[in-house]
Image (tube, rainbow, N blue to C red):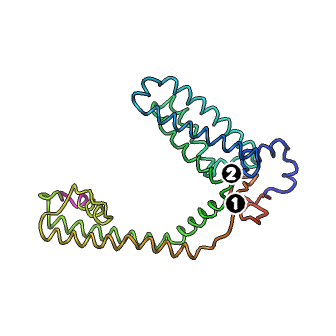
Amino acid sequence: MVSGGERRDWPAWRAQLQEIIFEADTPAGKAFDVGLLLVISASLVAVSIETVHPYGERYGRELVRIEWVFTAVFSVEYVLRLISVMRPLAYARSFFGIVDLLAVLPTYLSLLIPGAQSLLVIRGLRLLRVFRVFKLGHFVGEADLLRRALLQSRRKIILFVTAMLTMVAIMAALMYLIEGPESGFTSIPRSMYWAIVTMTTVGYGDISPRSPLGQFVASIVMIIGYGILAVPTGIFSVELLEASRRPVSTQACPSCAAEGHDTDARHCKFCGARL
């Protein structure tokens, strides 16, 4: 836990830097984040254009130079984020800390591994900051609500998926025996592929039963598919209704940069630092 003494010893310029980079409730912080989102969007456009063959050949060098400029900007920003928090390692291990690092690594890796720059689309994850930039703190609360509902329903969903996989295996083996290689059911794994496609109502049609008995079994699988689609939704909905809803603020912890705190919180629920 970060003590009050450590907070008092924190240099004013670093506290101000932390407020600009991590807080969206101030004009400077909002301007910084909006500018950052524009740069991220421009970077994603440049990466996407580079993958278009005619433009990649014609403007390849220019796009590479532009990409290095973006990488330099993001590298400086990442370093500033580490400097502006009391616990740099805590931020570096956080979700956005890892995303920020991955946003710059591909360009450097491209010097050793050709084509690694295509991984720069990871920068799109950084656009998630828009929730904080425009003060949509309730979306942070909704995300936490969904996370808790998923955690509460994970055992039931795992049990449901296990039962479905068992049913898929049974139906696949049955169709393999009924139809055989002549109808495209060349193996049980391939028959399982058909069962999954049919049960999920996707229906590619690349494999289909031809015999009356096989078509009858397929009809049963289709009907089962319509029924089972509602089961995981119902499980999750129940847990979602039971999950408590509490408002959260957009304030970032000055120590570990974590977000999603309650509006009346005085300490960070992740590292214990005073907010």
Residue at the spot x=63%, y=52% of the render?
Answer: 94
Q: Is residue 187 magenta?
A: yes
Query: Which dot marks residue 204?
Result: none
Identity, as a three-letter code, of the amino acid under mark 2: Ala
Q: Which residue is labeled 1 in the image?
A: 270
- Is 144 above or below relative to 58? below
> How far from the left and from the top, in percent, is residue 50?
46, 31
Tell which circle, 2 or 1, labels the residue nearer the N-terminal end: 2
The local crowd at label 2, few if under 14, some if 14 to 19, many if 20 or more residues have their Cα within 10 Å, is: some
Q: Secondary structure at mark 2?
A: helix
The residue depicted at 61 percent of the width and 40 percent of the height is 38
Q: Is residue 266 above or below residue 89?
A: below
Q: Is residue 12 left or right of residue 200?
A: right
Q: Amino acid at mark 1?
A: Phe
* Residue 232 as seen in the image, left or right of residue 142: left
Residue ID for mark 2:
90
Asked which secondary structure carries label 1, the reply is: loop
Disc 2 and disc 1 in contact, CB within 8 angstroms: yes
